[in-house]
Image: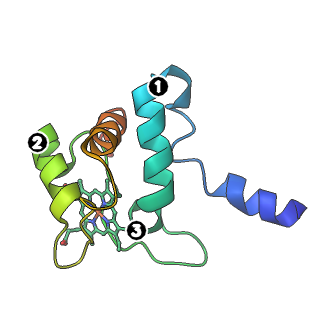
Amino acid sequence: MIRLIAIVVAALPLSAPAQEHLNDRQLLGMRLFNQSCRVCHAKPQPTSVQYGPTLSRTSAGGNDDAMRVFISNGTAKMPGFRYHFKPAEIDAIVAYLKTIPSPD
Ligand code: HEC
């Protein structure tokens, strides 16, 4: 059990630094991101390789609408989420992504 908690905590660092000043919508977006997106969009874990690009405020050209379209429709390599999330939930994820500093 302790080992399981350690693994969960170890998987969180991407979101931890920004967490303090997130508003409710951004926090919701972070939770949804952790559930549905991290698996492909987080830094490689010891047990897996990273599949998609690391996301930040500059993803999809830094354009909110482009992010929404991307998340809704997906691509050949990424599933679309328009049946999975309500529009407000996709907005929350975009709001969260906008809090992540550009990696460069
Ligand atoms: C199955 C793996 C997978 C999952 C799950 C996934 N993605 Fe992706 N995502 C990708 C891949 C791969 C790309 C690169 C696009 C391509 O090559 O088709 C991508 C690209 C993106 C981009 C565009 C990045 C850019 O700057 O071009 C955004 C934004 C994005 N994903 C957001 C999300 C969000 C938000 C979620 C969760 C709701 C999510 N993705 C879930 C694999 C995934």
- Height in image: 92 above or below 49? above
Q: Quadrant of the N terminus?
A: bottom right
Q: How is the image coloured?
A: rainbow
N-terminal label among 2 and 1:
1
- Height in image: 84 above or below 91? below
Q: Looking at the rendering, which quadrant does residue 56 occupy?
A: top left
Measuring from the top left, give residue 95's x and y in whole percent.
31, 34
Q: Is 74 situated left or right of 18 in this image?
A: left
**Amino acid residing under circle 1:** Asp
**Amino acid residing under circle 2:** Asp
> Which residue is under mark 2?
65
Disc 3 is placed on an element classified as helix
Measuring from the top left, give residue 85's x and y in whole percent.
33, 53
Disc 2 is placed on an element classified as helix
> Which residue is under mark 1?
24
The Cα–Cα distance between marks 2 and 1, rounded to whole angstroms, is: 21 Å
Q: Decide which of 81, 2 is in the foreground and name it.
A: 81
